[in-house]
Image: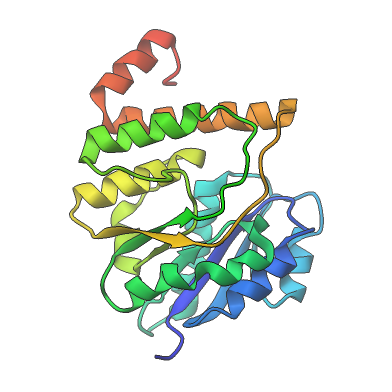
């Protein structure tokens, strides 16, 4: 098969890893386009990504992961023009050379066997958190759809263009993965988990990492609140749904 898949990589201040990620992604079977969305970086992420061979789109300020995904997908759509729409493979910017192991994510979509694949990392990185956000997402997905997600927050996903459009508008920020799974399953799209040998940078325990997890918790809770009335009621009581 000829190239029919575009890789979209949201990136914020990832100059140290983005080149390796781009080069590994570009070598994947079926991939003929890599788009990096420089989400308001203050380092040289965009320049390094472009030098590595990516098409780069830049946000003048940090707008969050979901917005970067939407921007990247729109860039692919414009580049597709009148051609058949490419599948969309979303990868994190900090995967580095392990992005080369993403091929199993793409294969079921290219073969027409799945509308969205979700990565399950076979090598687990020790995280600084306590799994609260993962449990919230996992339980929310199970309640909403009956689907038992193994790694519900994993951002490595391949979608058909039709599936991506069906999930728009994407949930804000770090709620995007949870919402994608729920929304596509509810619309009867075929969602499959795929084991891959990839790793990314582990989050630490300093204040920045704690702030990152707090934002994740907020965004996942808000994504669930839109989809689960019980969650919405609890957030209202806590004053968190603004």
Q: Which residue lies furthest to the bottom in this view?
A: 2
Q: Which residue is found at the position 73% from the left and 75% from the top?
A: 52
Name the residue nearer the viewer: 58 or 212.
212
Q: Is residue 36 above or below residue 61?
A: below
Q: In this view, does 196 lie above or below 232?
A: below
**Residue 76 sits above or below residue 141 on the image:** below
Position in image of residue 128 (x %, y %): 65, 32
110, 160: nearer the viewer: 110
What residue do we see at 45% from left, 39% from top? 175
Rendered image quadrant of residue 241: top left
Residue 129 placement, left or right of 162: right
Q: Nearer the viewer, residue 149 or 14?
A: 149
Numbered label tally: 0
Q: Position of residue 136 (x, y in %)?
A: 40, 29
Would you identify the image quadrant in which residue 36 lies?
bottom right
Q: Which residue is drawn at 63% across and 53% down?
A: 200
Q: Could you say which is closer to the camera, residue 227 or residue 76?
A: 227
* Screen quadrant of the N terminus: bottom left
Residue at the extreme top of the image, as rendered: 237
Q: Is residue 13 left or right of residue 107?
A: right
Which colour scheme appears in the figure?
A: rainbow
Say which quadrant the C terminus sits in. Answer: top left
The image shows residue 138 at horizontal and vertical percentages of 37, 36
Q: Is residue 35 visible?
A: no
Q: What residue sits 70% from the left and 49% below the top? A: 40
Residue 129: where, in percent of width, then height? Answer: 60, 29
Residue lying farthest to the front in this orientation? 123
Q: Visible in this render: residue 49?
A: yes
């Amino acid at each position: 098969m000829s190239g029919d898949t575009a890789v979209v990589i949201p990136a914020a201040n990832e100059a140290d890893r983005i080149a390796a990620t781009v080069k590994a992604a570009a070598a994947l079977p079926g991939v003929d386009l890599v788009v990096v969305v420089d989400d308001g970086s203050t380092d040289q992420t965009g320049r390094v990504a472009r030098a590595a061979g990516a098409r780069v789109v830049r946000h003048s300020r940090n707008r969050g992961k979901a917005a970067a995904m939407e921007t990247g997908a729109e860039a692919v759509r414009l580049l597709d023009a009148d051609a058949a729409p490419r599948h969309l493979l979303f990868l994190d910017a900090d995967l580095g050379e392990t992005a080369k192991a993403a091929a199993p994510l793409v294969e079921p979509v290219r073969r027409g066997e799945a509308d969205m694949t979700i990565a399950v990392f076979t090598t687990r990185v020790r995280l600084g958190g306590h799994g609260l956000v993962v449990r919230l997402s996992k339980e929310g997905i199970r309640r909403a759809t009956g689907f038992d997600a193994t790694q519900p927050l994993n951002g490595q996903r391949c979608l058909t263009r039709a599936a991506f459009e069906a999930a728009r508008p994407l949930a804000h920020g770090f709620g995007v993965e949870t919402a994608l799974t729920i929304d596509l399953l509810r619309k009867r799209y075929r969602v499959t988990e795929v084991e891959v040998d990839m790793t990314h940078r582990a989050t630490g325990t300093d204040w920045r990492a704690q702030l990152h997890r707090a934002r994740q918790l907020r965004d996942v809770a808000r994504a669930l609140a839109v989809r689960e009335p019980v969650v919405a009621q609890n957030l209202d009581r806590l004053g968190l749904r603004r």
